[in-house]
Image: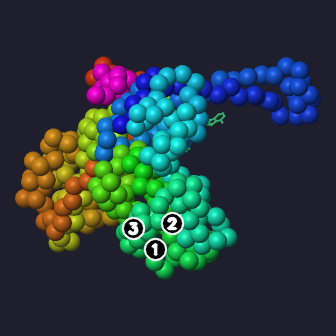
Amino acid sequence: MIRVEQLSKHYEVHEREPGFLASLRSLIHRKHRLVKAVDDISFHIPAGEIVGFLGPNGAGKTTTMKVLTGLLHPTSGRVEVAGFRPQDHKNAFKRRISLVMGQKSQLIWDVPAADSFLVNKAIYEIEDGAYRKTLSELVELLELEHVLHKPVRQLSLGERMKCELAASLLHRPDILFLDEPTIGLDVQMQEVVRRFILAYNQSVGATVLLTSHYMGDVTALCDRVMVIGGGRLLYDGELSELTERYSPRKRIRLLLDESGSLDRTREILLSTPGVTGIQLEEYPAIGLEVPREQVSAISASLLTSLPVLDLTIEDPSMESVIGQAFTEKSAPSKDCEPKLKQAEAVRD
Ligand SMILES: Nc1ncnc2c1ncn2[C@@H]1O[C@H](COP(=O)(O)OP(=O)(O)OP(=O)(O)O)[C@@H](O)[C@H]1O
């Protein structure tokens, strides 16, 4: 559905030093610097898949999305989306895709969202029956009934985001590019948007490429992730594998019965092989780290040696996993090199 081969997008930026004289000098001698926003990346996303596109600020995620939707021309490489070259701007292509940018609004600020929807109806030439049917489905799924007729500027961020999603999906695209769709939303609203994306993916069979800094979005929606940094694709594979590779430890949280003594607890933890990162500051709540493959054995042992009221096992945050992936990429070990290279091959 989406095929990207050796895509690069480079910008030549004019650099000017501060100050009046430097401004004058730059009129004659212009200094340029090449910014490799996207640098030789290849991947393939089959129909119906939801893929998380992760990376730090300035990594090249938005640039890639803009190339995939035809907003930017690639400097080099081949891009094919639903059989189209996005840069050809064919109407048939535009009807298949949608780009939702959490940071940018497509709704008209001073009029109700319902009016913006009518504008989209006209742009995409949606016929009346199909429009009414899709609109009523979207209004129900996103619970938009009470906000549809208020001017957009009076809506809360969450209400506006739901209207943005509805506006973007009225033409029932089957390929979605979602750039930070939950940015700034509270936890409850993030959950509503996630559930909606999943429901849309399942009902339309839509292919989704999603960027987000909220790892909750990624873990809830994506089995596969691509990690980009400095314009290069650093990882392309299963989310679970990324977590296992770059985070070989899990966290165990324990809540103990206060009848036990702190000193005795410390002694037991220190004498349990594999336990590190012991946090006792909030005793009787305790945090510790254990090797991933020993998590069951150590949990079982702690349940017998300590007066445990509650035990939870957690994966590390995705931020720390990605941070680790970046550290290793800058100084790759023999072990991680093949996996990182795998990202450079096109997936079948
Ligand atoms: N029009 C442009 N001219 C010059 N450089 C640009 C331009 N657009 C983007 N860049 C640069 O390209 C790089 C990638 O930017 P991009 O917006 O794709 O990053 P991103 O991964 O989406 O980051 P964020 O998470 O902050 O949105 C950045 O270094 C950015 O400054």
Element carrying mark 2: helix
Instruction: Identify whether 218 is placed above or below 53.
Output: below
Instruction: Identify whether 254 is placed above or below 66.
Output: below
Dot 1 alpha-carbon crowd within 10 angstroms: few under 14, some 14 to 19, many 20 or more: some
Circle nearer the viewer, 3 or 1? 3
Residue labelled with disc 3: 133
Element carrying mark 3: helix
x, y percentage for residue 226?
38, 37
Question: Does the rendering let one see residue 29?
Answer: yes
x, y percentage for residue 42?
41, 26
What residue type is disc 3 on?
A: Lys
| Ligand 1 rendered quadrant | top right
What residue is at 42 percent from the left and 41 percent from the top? 53
What residue type is disc 2 on?
A: Cys
Q: Which mark is residue 163?
A: 2
319 falls in the magenta region: no
Front-most of 45 and 28?
45
Q: Earlier in the sequence, mark 1 or mark 2?
A: 1
What residue is at 85 percent from the left and 19 percent from the top? 29
What residue type is disc 1 on?
A: Leu
Residue labelled with disc 1: 144
